[in-house]
Amino acid sequence: MEIRITRLSKDFASEGKRIHALAKVDLTIPANQIFTLLGPSGCGKTTLLRCIVGLEAPDEGEITIGGEVVWSGARGVFVPPEKRGLGMVFQTYAIWPHMTVFENVAYPLQARKRPREEIRRMVMRTLERVQLVGFENRPATKLSGGQQQRVALARALAAEPKVILFDEPLSNLDAKLREETRKELRRFLTELKITAVYVTHDRVEALSLSDAIAVMKDGRIVEIGDPHKIYFDSDHRFVADFIGRANLIDGRVAAQEGAHTRVDSVIGPIACQLRPQLVAGSPVAVCIRPEFIRVAARAQDTEGGANRFRGRLESLVFVGEAYEGEIRVGDQRLIARIHPAAALVEGVEVEFAVEPEHCLALSH
């Protein structure tokens, strides 16, 4: 079921000031995809989610779900949350402590006055989907954090909604459980083939879960794309910096040369991915991910790279699967992911190279 947002605005008053939580947002969320709203705290992503579900009333604009207008300022339309046919999973789970697992999952169906046998059939089918069969008579709050999260998911899915919305649902889980739950959630939502709208500030969640990502800042959509596009080929400096560790090197476009855009930077000339829309002389930041910097102690180890530089290895920290090194080139510091078997020590001069396809020139 497609969701269409048109010119949606929402302001809040705080300490005598008007805060623009949403600033004329236009957005189409395709049917049957996992669509993530990603951004820092205060960017408007949760406000947008709450407007979609009906827990927040916008100031202007329009929201359409599956072709039905559920909110319109101009037309005076407001469909209450319980009639929008949506499922919602909150950050805090919102599990009722006095109920069993079965009772928690059954509650939305009971509120809709479904027949008793139908409720039992739908609850047990949903518990099977989330691998909680056998837990139905347990007090919900006696379960582990991951199991409680699955109870919240089952409750949202029991009524078979066409759209399900998630408000940072994994933030209360520890790192290992969060990783496992992400995989389960991705598999589960893909199999169900329903529209899922997921809010998070965690880039790993966004990249691993999503079919598409909308990055938000200051109440606006900055960029939309699939995870690969957002990470490797973003159009905005803010997005490139927010979505992952990034070295941003200031410079100016020197020329468009064949298959590359050449940038004169503070560390020297850099051949980048071709960006023909950038004109000579325009200021840019060259984005280079740490994992794409090839570091060696000897010059011949980096031969063949179009972009070769020298610098001083100022720090070297072991992080398990790799070393994280900090290289100084003049006044510029660069972070590099270095193979754990590399025979390097802090303080040495090193050669490093980066392929042009891994250098992205971003306009300011």
Image (cartoon, rainbow, N blue to C red):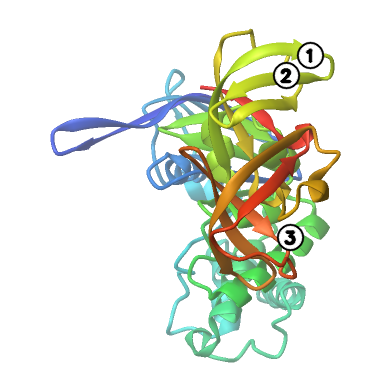
Residue 118 x/y as whole percent: 72, 71
Q: Which amino acid, by three-letter code, is at mark 3?
A: Arg
Foreground mark, 3 or 2, reads 2
Q: Which residue is mark 2?
A: 261
Question: What residue would you read off at disc 1?
Answer: 257
Q: Secondary structure at mark 1?
A: strand
- The alpha-carbon separation of the residues under discs 3 and 2 comes to 37 Å
Closer-to-camera residue (332/24):
332
Neighbour class for label 3 at 10 Å: few (<14), some, many (≥20)? some
Q: Earlier in the sequence, mark 1 or mark 3?
A: 3
x, y (%) of residue 107? Answer: 54, 71
The correct choice, above or below, for 207 with respect to 354 in the image is below
* Residue positioned 47% across, 42% down in the render: 45
Q: Residue at x 67, y 42 (%)?
A: 231
Q: CA distance from mark 1 to mark 3?
A: 42 Å
> Which residue is located at x 73 percent, y 66 percent?
342
Q: Which residue is mark 3?
A: 186
Disc 2 from disc 1: Cα separation: 6 Å
